[in-house]
Image (cartoon, grey):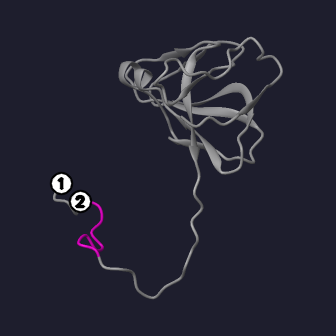
Amino acid sequence: MERIKIKVRYLDGCQDIPLPQYETDGASGMDIRACIKEPVVIHPGEIVFIPTGLAVSIPPGYEGQIRPRSGLALKHGIGMVNSPGTIDSDYRGEIGIIVINWGQQPFRVQRGDRIAQMIISKVYRGEIALVTDLDDTQRGEGGFGHSGVE
């Protein structure tokens, strides 16, 4: 398995929060934790910004994808509004998680809670070529609902 170095910097007041880490040998995502001063209650339908207290340096040619944690989604209806979020290789600001409560009950986030996961992925840049015709496919211009799902 290829490994690349991700440099991480703590922001002030967050040095007690564990760094992102893989929880199992087969995990693709590193868990990221909340760096909040006080507990935050997210009410059903509410969108909240949760800071992580971390800034990263991802090498050129890679990105960080921030994704929800499936256990929080299943058990509490907690997700991310912009899932997956993207951390570009040239971004040096704080990683923030835009959390939404799609569940039925308020959800409490405490300092150090695992709230998201970060996946490091290779990036390919597309080269745009303006043409007058595109190659034909069986699907063609079939869009939403084209497969017969009503």
Vertically, is 58 above or below 13? below
Q: Is residue 117 left or right of residue 132?
A: right
**Is 111 or 84 nearer to us in this picture?**
84
Q: Residue at x 66, y 37 (%)?
A: 4
| Label 2 element class | loop
Q: Is residue 39 left or right of residue 148?
A: right
Q: Residue furthest right?
A: 12
Q: Residue at x 23, y 72 (%)?
A: 138
Q: Residue at x 53, y 82 (%)?
A: 130
Label 1 belongs to which residue? Answer: 149
Q: Residue at x 52, y 17 (%)?
A: 23
Disc assigned to residue 109:
none
Viewport quadrant of the C terminus:
bottom left
Callouts 2 and 1 close, C-beta under 8 Å: yes
Vertically, is 9 above or below 66? above
The residue range painted magenta reads 137-144
**Is 41 or 56 nearer to us in this picture?**
56
Q: How many marks?
A: 2
| Label 1 element class | loop
Label 2 packing within 10 angstroms: few (<14), some (14-19), many (20+) = few
Label 2 belongs to which residue? Answer: 145
Q: Amino acid at mark 2?
A: Gly
Label 1 packing within 10 angstroms: few (<14), some (14-19), many (20+) = few
